[in-house]
Image: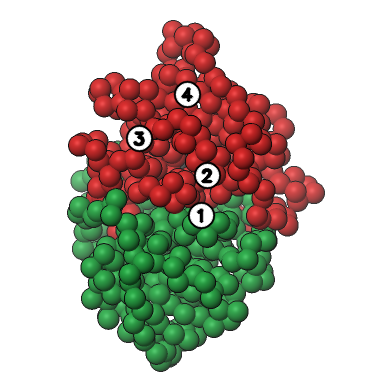
Chain colours: A green, B red
């Protein structure tokens, strides 16, 4: 059996989610080939070759792959899919965009957002915002799987796989074109790989107060900043900070929820954190039902005190 | 221009779901059902395009049992023009839904299909991308902004690092994210009016598509429970516990 892992990267660097998806791919078993499709992506390909457990790195370097558009990328993956039994990608917005397109073109089902591998064709995945966990078995000749990154540790370095060029002729898709991207430079750890996350909700009342309260604390802790949907909708935080069922799923060592009520859609994105702290003025807030440590009170008073106590 | 909006009937987002004791699924008996929230956003976007003079007709389609007609009626009450119910037996998987939708697209010839990015029951996030693939159309997933201009859809997408904008030649498939719009409530007169709007019923078998399931659900379980911990009185006590009890600082 052989597995094709689709790398997520920005040409220069490999996304950490790729190393996490590799761990799932290794559990599925067989030889693992990593596809790095991009433009001037030698940096990412080199990083993929160093991951322990990778047998080959296949590089498709082409102008049409400069941005990860679903149409050319899916066409390329489908053209390469023949010899593979499983096609795997991280369940990030990258993988979620491309892989269902691949699955449909191959006429097979996709198993989304797996959190465990039971057998090469059998996987565990959360449904209903994590309120139920299903075990599903694929009956298709090929399995297409996206991997919940927070459920798998990143594969270690230590490999030295050969890097081979592959043709990108199949990467067609004239009907779509990249226009622009707004990707702010990260000032602190990335949400999905951070050891500590400080997360804020509707309580903060403005973008200024959100930042003024959470940033000093996050700086002191070396933490990433997260947000509830309410905070993002209200414009206190950027969309890519949303944690939850329909945002990012995180599982840090420490998650500090500040002024967040604990709606199931939010819990779906953070309840697998190792230690959860809730700070909320409402002693009945549902977030306290899953918090290891609860502090009842006003975030505007408590967060500066907390920062000083650290 | 015609816009097709697929809508799914799901458990209302406020309901706490319970897993059935026999592990066969979740308990749907006597549970409040509603239109998938992302699909409401899709209907709203289509209506706004129509109101802006960019679209002619808005057609809502649902694939499911006879009760899915309620969800279609919700879309009609919001303002969609007519509905199509594709009747199936067991709940179809995303690939089967995409195949049925492709058949509907071939009959209706819309220039734009707007779907929710994911259904809040199976959380699959697949159908729009699969439909685009089967049609050979471009896709703009997780949209927070949609602009139609000269035969193209310009879609701003919510991606992990921020936002990305793509330009898709029409016809195209777009899937909605939360920030695309805030869906309207149906007004009473519109609810009354919607009762007279036409809903076509088609048997899935008549579409000539393979809807057979590809996945076997072996079991459905409740997630491991997380116990509530303790209350601390002060930030200083919290820091002490995090350092000396939890060992995370
Ligand atoms: C389809 C769908 C998808 C969704 N996806 C997500 C998702 O991915 N992520 C997500 O987070 N939500 C999601 N939601 C929204 C979710 O249902 C909740 O509405 C949201 O999580 C609430 O955010 P919040 O806790 O910040 O706000 P609220 O529920 O309003 O809670 C604010 C909390 O702050 C406390 N508070 C207020 N002032 C203070 C103060 N001064 N000091 C201390 N505490 C204070 C209050 O007691 C309250 O508990 C989704 C909803 C739907 C329908």
Compared with residue B228, is residue B99 higher up or lower down, i.e. above or below? above
Chain containing the residue with disc 3: B
Chain containing the residue with disc 1: A
The answer to whether the beta carbon of the residue marked 4 is less than 8 Å from any atom of ligand 1 is no
Q: Please report the residue visible at 39 percent of the width from the left and 32 percent of the height from the top.
A: B110
Circle number at residue A104: 1
- How far separated are the C-alphas under marks 3 and 1? 21 Å
Chain containing the residue with disc 2: B
Q: Please, what secondary structure does the residue beneath circle 1 have?
A: helix
For the residues labelled 3 and 4, say whether their Cβ atoms are less than 8 Å apart. Answer: no
Mark 2 = which residue?
B98
Mark 3 = which residue?
B111
Q: Position of residue A200 (x, y in %)?
A: 35, 49
Give the class, few, some or many, for how many residues have Cα within 10 Å of label 4's Cα (few <14, many ≥20).
many
- How far separated are the C-alphas under marks 3 and 2? 16 Å
Chain containing the residue with disc 4: B
- How far separated are the C-alphas under marks 4 and 2? 20 Å
Residue B219 seen in the figure: yes
Labels 3 and 2 within one chain = yes
Mark 4 = which residue?
B75
């Amino acid at each position: 059996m052989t597995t094709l892992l689709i790398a997520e990267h920005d040409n220069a660097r490999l996304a950490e989610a790729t190393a996490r998806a590799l761990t799932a791919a290794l559990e599925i078993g067989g030889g693992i080939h990593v596809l790095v499709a991009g433009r001037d992506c030698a940096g990412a390909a080199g990083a993929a070759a160093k991951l322990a457990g990778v047998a080959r790195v296949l590089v498709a370097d082409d102008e049409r792959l400069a941005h990860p558009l679903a149409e050319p990328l899916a066409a390329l993956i489908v053209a390469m899919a023949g010899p593979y039994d499983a096609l795997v990608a991280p369940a990030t917005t990258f993988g979620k965009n491309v892989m269902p397109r691949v699955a449909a073109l191959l006429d097979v089902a996709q198993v989304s957002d797996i959190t465990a591998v039971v057998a090469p064709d059998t996987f565990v995945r959360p449904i209903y915002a994590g309120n139920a966990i299903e075990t599903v078995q694929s009956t298709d000749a090929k399995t297409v799987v996206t991997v919940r990154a927070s459920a798998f540790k990143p594969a270690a370095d230590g490999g030295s796989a050969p890097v081979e060029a592959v043709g990108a002729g199949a990467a067609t898709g004239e009907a779509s074109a990249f226009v622009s991207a707004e990707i702010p430079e990260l000032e602190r750890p990335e949400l999905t790989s951070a050891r500590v996350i400080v997360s804020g909700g509707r309580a903060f009342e403005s973008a200024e107060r959100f930042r003024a309260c959470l940033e000093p604390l996050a700086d002191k802790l070396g933490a990433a900043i997260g947000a509830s949907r309410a905070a993002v909708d209200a414009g206190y935080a950027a969309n890519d900070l949303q944690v939850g069922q329909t945002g990012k799923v995180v599982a840090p060592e420490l998650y500090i929820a500040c002024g967040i009520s604990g709606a199931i859609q939010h819990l779906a994105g953070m309840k697998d954190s190792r230690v959860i702290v809730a700070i909320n003025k409402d002693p009945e807030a549902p977030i306290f039902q899953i918090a290891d440590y609860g502090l009842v009170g006003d975030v505007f008073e408590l967060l500066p005190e907390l920062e000083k106590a650290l | 221009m015609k816009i097709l909006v697929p809508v799914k009937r799901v458990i209302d987002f406020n309901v706490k779901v319970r897993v059935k004791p026999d592990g066969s699924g979740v308990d749907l008996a006597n549970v409040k059902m509603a239109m998938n929230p992302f699909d409401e956003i899709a209907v709203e976007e289509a209506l706004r395009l129509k109101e802006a003079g960019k679209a002619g007709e808005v057609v809502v389609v649902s694939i499911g049992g006879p009760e899915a007609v309620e969800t279609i009626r919700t879309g009609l009450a919001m303002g969609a023009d007519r509905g199509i119910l594709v009747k199936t037996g067991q709940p179809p998987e995303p690939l089967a839904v995409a195949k049925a939708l492709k058949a509907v697209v071939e009959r209706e010839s819309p220039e734009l299909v707007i779907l929710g990015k994911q259904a809040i029951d199976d959380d699959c996030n697949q159908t729009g991308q699969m439909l685009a693939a089967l049609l050979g159309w471009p896709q703009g997933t997780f949209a927070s902004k949609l602009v139609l201009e000269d035969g193209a859809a310009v879609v701003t997408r919510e991606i992990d690092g921020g936002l990305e904008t793509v330009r898709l030649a029409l016809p195209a498939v777009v899937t909605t994210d939360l920030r695309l719009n805030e869906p309207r409530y149906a007004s009473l007169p519109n609810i009354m009016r919607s009762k007279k709007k036409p809903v076509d019923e088609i048997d899935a078998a008549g579409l000539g598509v393979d809807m057979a399931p590809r996945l076997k659900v072996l079991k459905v379980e409740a997630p491991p429970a997380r116990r509530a911990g303790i209350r601390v009185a002060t930030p200083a006590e919290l820091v002490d516990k995090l350092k000396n009890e939890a060992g995370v600082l």
